[in-house]
Image (cartoon, helix red, strand yellow):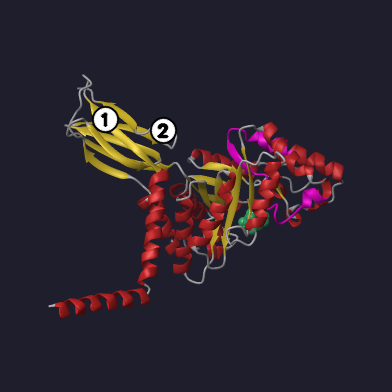
Amino acid sequence: MRQWLVLGLLAIASGLIHWLCSGGAQTMAATTSATKLDASIRRLRTGDLVIRVVDSQQQPVAGATVTLEQTAHDFDFGTALSTQMFRPNVAAHEQAQYLQIAKQWFNASVHEDALKWYSTEPEQGQVSYADADRILAWSEANGLKMRGHTLFWAVEKWNQPWVRALSPQELRQAVERRTTEICHRYRGKISEYDVLNELLHGDFYQQRLGEGIVDQIFQWCRDADPTARLYVNDYDVLNGKLLDAYVHQIRSLLDRGVPVGGIGVQAHVREPMTAAQIQHCLDTLAQFRLPIKITELGVVAATEAEQARILKDLYTVAFAHPAVTGILMWGFWAGANWEPAAAIFKHNFEPTLAARTYQDLVFNQWWTKVNGKTNSSGVVAAQAFFGRYQVTVRAGNHSTIRTVSLTPQSPMPQVVTITLPF
Ligand code: 9MR
């Protein structure tokens, strides 16, 4: 008997060793961290929504059918929008598909190029916001919240020749005029700006106008629109190459009182990247207690599966992080993308595996759909992702539809009372 017990224990031990050697422990670790991410997503991104159904005497109605259908996310899932796709000379069938995807798949947007200085004023004095305004008007009409990219670009080569040829005094005036004009013009429509894009990679303005110009530009924008959130925005941060330099730069800007209100993390991924790297970057930047946005996401990888895996890690780790308030792809269609291989829709608009992965996360796993019957207190309660809902209550042959918003600022639980007319 004892012999059998010893043999049994040995068999269990050898099975355990085999499991450990075959990578079981790794699988277990990965599962645990996925579970942890999922738990923090639920904790951060959902709230308690209580639908209470009463009759005209304010008495609870039991057994009514309540359907909660999420219609939008509160969190920004955005995309850059390409200038060319909003111009009249683009192929109508491509434009229609592009716009259809943009409004179905995203709730936030940013001009890819239309607001850059070289776009709005290619020649000195010939200022036009026609492209930028068209994209903004379309975004507003379709419920996509816009960010402003970019007031200035610190890298010299992205400044058009006439700007580079200005004297310091003329440049300073031109910079002040542009800042004030844009921040004033879009007040209440664009709520955040990349102020000096890629300050880790260029110092065009400081070279010509001195270090203080950075503070000055932030201040001019703030004066023209005190409500706008002002971002720094850079790359080589997620992969860790310039993470310390970014921390140092943000700290010194804040130390000297520059009103930096948000941290932009570009995510043009071209090398393998792990969830741990992404987590480390976000944790490090969170020390400033400022909102972080993934501003320019695009993944180029050796295979579609690898592209989808990295994209999934980026979205999941970022959505699970308390400091992150939004994620924007840098375009989505290969026919209008600076890096077609990063696009999640092919030229013929066929979705890649990465597109399906994004869709599953944003509109399935992180999306609330509830169908229930009220209990004896007239209540259906749900843990629901922050966003907008259509609530339908059916009792007998009566039905009522109500639109409800659930946000992190909502009282918890948020109780919505629906009174039936009988
Ligand atoms: O995608 C943009 C491309 O259409 C432009 O030709 C290019 C130069 O203006 O800029 C690209 O977008 C860049 C963004 O503005 C800043 N971060 C890097 C992006 C990719 O180069």
Q: Is residue 140 visible?
A: yes
Q: Amino acid at mark 1?
A: Arg
Q: Is mark 2 within 8 Å of ligand 1?
A: no
Image position of 368 with respect to 30: above or below? above
Residue at figure coordinates x 69%, y 50% from the top left: 249
Please state, as top left, top right, bottom left or bottom right, where the N terminus lies in the image.
Answer: bottom left
Q: Furthest residue to the front?
A: 2
Please state, as top left, top right, bottom left or bottom right, where the C terminus lies in the image.
Answer: top left
Q: Position of residue 130 (x, y in %)?
A: 64, 42
Q: Is residue 197 visible?
A: no
Q: CA distance from mark 1 to mark 2?
A: 16 Å
Residue at figure coordinates x 47%, y 55% from the top left: 317
Graded by Cα atoms within 10 Å as few (under 14), some (14 to 19) or many (20 or more), the crowding at tag 2 reads some
Q: Position of residue 254 (x, y in %)?
A: 67, 42
Residue at figure coordinates x 21%, y 35% from the top left: 374
Identify the disc placed on residue 410.
2
Q: Badge 1 is on which residue? A: 52
Image position of 192 with respect to 352: above or below? above
Q: Nearer the viewer, residue 73 or 218?
A: 218
Q: Is residue 200 magenta?
A: yes
Give the SS element for disc 2: loop
Write the start and end of the magenta stretch as one range. 178-207
Left or right of 3? Residue 100 is right
Give the mark nearest the N terminus, 1 or 2. Answer: 1
Ligand 1 quadrant assignment = bottom right
Q: Is mark 1 within 8 Å of ligand 1?
A: no
Q: Amino acid at mark 2?
A: Ser
